[in-house]
Image (spheres, rainbow, N blue to C red):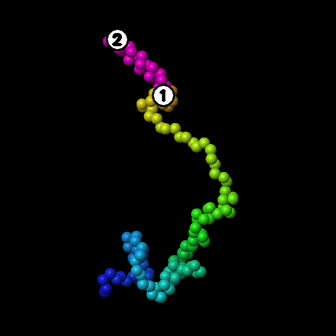
Amino acid sequence: NLPGVELAMVDNLSLLDLAPGGHLGRFCIWTKGAFEKLDSIFGTYEESAKFKSGFNLPRSFMTNADLTRIINSDEVQSVLKPMVTGPTLVIPKKRNPLRRPEVKAALNPYQSAVRAREVKKATADKAAK
């Protein structure tokens, strides 16, 4: 019973045991029997797992992880299409139809008739006073 020392069974091992709080870097001491048990639980690259049916260790898809060097290589750049340089697409600024009558008329063509009727009524009411 040493303070700060924990024992864990390989069968019950979880990510929280190895990296509490998601922080890697816990010091682990493994026995030879524990590694053999891990191989039987999760399998190896040559043979599949014995206790987990259908489980295979994940393999890396890329043998060379230097993606920038691969993209900038002459072999890849010679096959790529040239970069298109031309006029850029200008997206018009959104205008508020409640404040701009021309935008409101574009959205609702009947709005001009409604507005003309309101102006006519307002001038008639003003003349009546």
**Amino acid type of disc 1?**
Glu
Task: Decide if residue 95 is in sight here.
Answer: yes
Disc 2/disc 1 C-alpha distance (Å):
30 Å
Lower sequence index among marks 2 and 1: 1
Q: Tell me if mark 2 has few (under 14), some (14-19) or many (20+) residues whose alpha carbon lies within 10 angstroms of its own.
A: few
Q: Position of residue 78 (x, y in %)?
A: 69, 59
Q: Nearer the viewer, residue 78 or 3?
A: 78
Which amino acid lies under the numbered mark 2 shown in the image of this protein?
Answer: Ala
Q: Any magenta on residue 96?
A: no
Tell whether 87 sits left or right of 35.
right
Which-is-in-front pick, marks 2 and 1? 1
Left or right of 71, for residue 11: left
- Please report the residue visible at 45 percent of the width from the left and 20 percent of the height from the top: 116
- Disc number for residue 128: 2
Q: Position of residue 98 (x, y in %)?
A: 42, 31
Q: Which residue is mark 1?
A: 102
Which residues lie in the magenta part? 110-129
* Secondary structure found at label 2: helix
Q: Residues within 10 Å of mark 1 (few under 14, many from 20)?
A: some
| Numbered circle sitting on residue 82 | none
At 68% from the left and 63% from the top, the residue drawn is: 75
Contact, mark 2 vs mark 1 (Cβ under 8 Å):
no
Q: Main secondary structure of the magenta part?
A: helix
